[in-house]
Amino acid sequence: MASLTRQMATFFESSRFAVVGASTDKKKFGNRVLCWYIDHQKPVTPVHPKEREIEGIAAIPSLADLTGEPTDVSVSVITPPAVTKGVLEQGVAKGITKFWLQPGAEFPGWQAFADEHKVLVIAQGPCVLRDAKL
């Protein structure tokens, strides 16, 4: 397995990003992570099943609704573990290959899932707010 530094470099090679679990509540990590991408001038799409706009950016209800080349998108996931596996399954079905599970989003078996589907999954502690190196 590649070092965390190399995994993060690969994650940030994408030209587009999505935040699943984006929130309109500025106190929640889903909003804070979305704002991190905005503050770092990264093209980002918020993903939320009900909200149509977050932080002035049009939101989509699911990764299935993402347009453009899926292999050029990296996805930050801020969802409960019970939801996260479905998010990854949806992303893989779409052709997305790079995911960052923010702390607390990991589900049992995430590493086996990553290995089976040959996708990059950053997990088990690193947080984009604290650890991202651009």
Image (cartoon, rainbow, N blue to C red):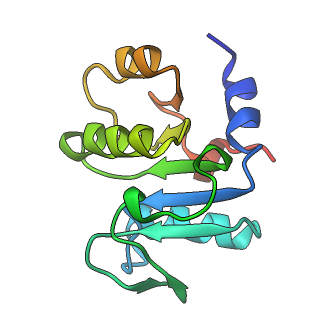
Q: Quadrant of residue 68?
A: bottom right
| On-image quarter of the N terminus | top right
Please tell me which residue lies in front, 59 or 26. Answer: 59
> Relative to 96, does residue 44 appear above or below in the rendering?
below
Q: Give the residue at the far left of this rendering.
A: 82
> Relative to 25, does residue 84 appear above or below in the rendering?
above
Residue 92 rendering spot, x and y as whole percentages? 43, 37
Please tell me which residue lies in front, 103 or 11. Answer: 11
Residue at image coords 75%, 66%: 40
Residue 11 rendering spot, x and y as whole percentages? 67, 39
> Relative to 99, does residue 27 appear above or below in the rendering?
below
Q: Give the residue at the far top of this rendering.
A: 1
Please tell me which residue lies in front, 67 or 120. Answer: 67
> Relative to 21, does residue 124 appear above or below in the rendering?
above
Question: Can the viewer see residue 105?
Answer: no
Residue at image coords 33%, 33%: 106
Residue at image coords 49%, 60%: 19
Residue 47 rendering spot, x and y as whole percentages? 41, 66
Question: Can the viewer see residue 63?
Answer: yes
Residue 131 rendering spot, x and y as whole percentages? 65, 41
